[in-house]
Amino acid sequence: MRYILGVDGGGTKTTARIADKEGNTLGQGVSGASNYHSVGIEKAIMNLNQAINKAWSDSGLLPTVFASCCFGFAGYNTELDRPSYERIVFNAQLTPLLNTDRVLIFNDTRVGLAAGSDCSNKVILIAGTGSNCYGLNQQGQQAKATGWDYILADEGSGYSMGLKALRAIMKAYDGRGPYTLLTDIILGHLGLESIDHLIMWTYQKPFSKDRIGDLSKQVCDAAENGDQVSQQILAEEAKEAVRSVSAVVEKLGLEGQEFDLVMVGGNFKCEKYFKQKLALDLKAKYPGIKFLPLTREPVHGAVKLAIENL
């Protein structure tokens, strides 16, 4: 039998799935992150191999050469990243199992989009701790916007919301900005007694954008409790997400066409002040848009693309 390998290599975990050429799952394994920007190349190799070994073990099959493979990695943002990810994929343990003519290496948004939509015109918008937007049209053209991480471009992300929340708290504390419920809500959530403790928490090492990104949940809570500062933060981030989608749609020439928008990430749980505002703006601009939640694991998209590459 010819076996297929799909991998979703994220910043938190790596999922590997072995399937047959019809896409039926034979085995699956999960390990740690394989984004080399966050864990380094050697750790990424170890986690990737571990996930694949677990998938073989789960399948009950003996390892053999894969007919086709697709790897989707968080952190594969530019072509300058490709040599590092090729080093991770073509490592000493894994290379003997690869059909080198049938190996695809993409950013993880590509496999997420394949998992989320079967439409020929489709866009994926990620709004979690980080943000990203990527699309494909029926001519096979690709386009991307944002997703350049927390310094260069991460608008519409939990990190951006959390950072604005922390700055709003400090403005209120100084008298440079209006009172906000965020102060009590975030201090309570973090179990901190004062602004001094919040400052220490913010700058403690090692730096983690995940800690700040997690505060987006408290921004939504404050907004739902009538906090105008939080509502404004979420409105701004929704507009930024709309700008990202619009940039991709216009690059792909989808303005007057029907297309799917796959929405991924915890910020879409903030229905009233983020998701609904974003959706209303986009529907007004693009009547042919269809909103879809991601209901299948991204690794499903990796398997799907590997099969298409046979």
Image (cartoon, helix red, strand yellow):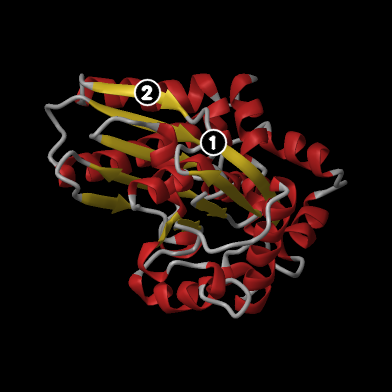
State the residue position of label 1: 24
Mark 1 residue element: loop
Above or below residue 149? Residue 249 is above
Residue, far front:
1
Question: Residue 291, labelled with which disc?
Answer: 2
- Which amino acid type is marked by label 2? Phe
State left or right for residue 310 relative to residue 248.
Answer: right
Residue 110 shows in the view: no
Identify the residue at image location x=72%, y=65%: 203
Above or below residue 50? Residue 26 is above
- Which amino acid type is marked by label 1? Asn
Of the residues tagged 2 and 1, which is closer to the observer? 1
Image quarter of residue 180: top right
State left or right for residue 140 relative to residue 191.
Answer: left
Residue 28 place in picture, x, y as percent: 66, 46
In depth, the one of 34 and 53 nearer the eye is 53
